[in-house]
Amino acid sequence: MSNTGTSWRIQGARVIDPFRGIDAVLDVTVRDGVFVEDHDPSLPVVDAKGLWLVPRLTDMHVHFRDPGLEYKEDLASGSRAAAAGGFTVVCTMPNTKPVVDIPSLVEWQKERAETLGLVRIWPIGAVTKGEEGKELAEMYQMAQAGAIGFSDDGHPVADSRIMRAALSYSATLNRPIIQHSEDPDLFAGGSMHEGAISQQLGLGGIPAEAESIMVWRDVELVQLTRGILHVAHVSAPGSLEAVRYAKNKGLAVTAEAAPHHLFLSDDAVREWQYSAVTKVNPPLRPAAMQEALIQAVTSGLIDVLASDHAPHHADEKAEPYDKAPFGISGLETFLGTVMTVFLGRGLLSPLDLFAKLTAMPHQVLRQSYAGISPGAAADLTLIDPGAVWTVDPAAFYSKGHNTPLAGATLTGRAVATMVGGRWTMREQEVLG
């Protein structure tokens, strides 16, 4: 299989297409970078028997650190990590240096992605200038430049007046406000979940209420403004109740969960003996909260799964727990983690699981895509559902090797990624 050319016949794959509700063994033809119906025998053939074919895998929450923090990650290394993980679209958070709060930086990220040709990058613009929470950024202009949504992720929009204004604009722009939900005062000084284990380890705790209080406030503001809210990386029971309340009221509120919150509990901090690879924001929660989050995903209360890929330099993660930065590198373990949790336990069908990585992110972001339909861009991933593998951060394409999943055994892995008819990864080798 070569990566050159944009026309292929992919034979014998189990096609799992949540955009069209299809789960069947089919042959798929790509011609000139788009899906077509004809089965031209002259095209190069890919034997995909035993593999799953999923269109347009999307991670709507990644940190590529570029511009300004390229020692942690840049658009090139992040794009390679995305391709290796099986993703064809990623949404980049704006907490870079400088912050992505002006149209030219949105345009630069999109142009750089086109040049790299490994993944489609959909930039997220900042809600406030410099992510300082004091004054709205140029939201309209950034939307015109291609910003897919707005977030101050890494920080909450804590000022209720600013958040009210942002939500009002979101309805006009038809783009969500993606909120990193935490009460800064309750969060202050914390390093991990506030509970029995933080007390045993002597680490500053972050109560679950630091998250849920902010989610409840934002739901009330959505009722006031009729804006569009997406709650990032939900982890707390109270947040789930707020999202449920909002959905029952018919409000435009959606939510995502991150794989590490579904796979690990706060006991991992003790198991890793204070290693900051377990330090993430929001923090890993107790097993009972972890299970409640899993149930929220299976019930449909959680709309989207997203990695919150947050790479850091090894020297930063080697700092004492209370001083090290928050964040886990998650792109290259994402698929295996969620397939192990939900398919391994029989909690979701493959069609329902992959909807949360394909059709639902598009719905949340108000983006259209027809799946495997004639004329649609040929973005797809081939997955080996039976692949059993051990996480080795040294093999990551990401610059960030910070993950508490190191040494974990996962089932399910991407073996090839295609964007616009061109292979960007095959058999864990990123191409181009």
Image (tube, grey):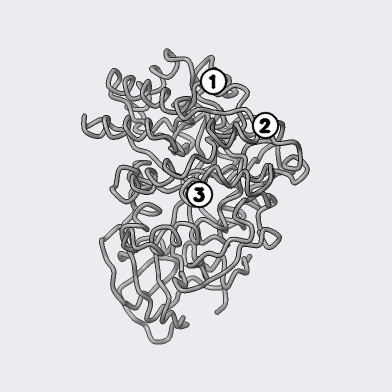
Residue shown at 27% from the left, 66% from the top: 22
The image position of residue 251, as x and y in percent, is 26, 30
Q: Which residue is mark 2?
A: 97
Q: Is residue 381 above or below residue 400?
A: below
Quadrant occupied by the N terminus:
bottom right
Give me the C-alpha separation between circle 2 and circle 3: 19 Å
Q: What's the amino acid at mark 3?
A: Val
Total numbered labels placed on residues in the image:
3
Q: In what element is the residue under mark 2? A: loop
Numbered label attached to residue 421:
none
Splitting the image into 4 quarters, where does residue 53 fall?
bottom left
Q: Which residue is mark 1?
A: 184
Dot 3 crowding, Cα within 10 Å, few <14, some 14–19, many 20+: many
Dot 1 crowding, Cα within 10 Å, few <14, some 14–19, many 20+: some
Q: Considering depth in this image, is 29 or 268 the residue closer to the camera?
A: 268
Give me the C-alpha separation between circle 2 and circle 1: 22 Å
The image position of residue 146, as x and y in percent, is 47, 38
Q: Considering depth in this image, is 264 or 143 the residue closer to the camera?
A: 264
The image position of residue 359, as x and y in percent, is 34, 52
Q: Is residue 316 left or right of residue 146?
A: right
Q: Which residue is mark 3?
A: 90
Q: What's the amino acid at mark 1?
A: Pro
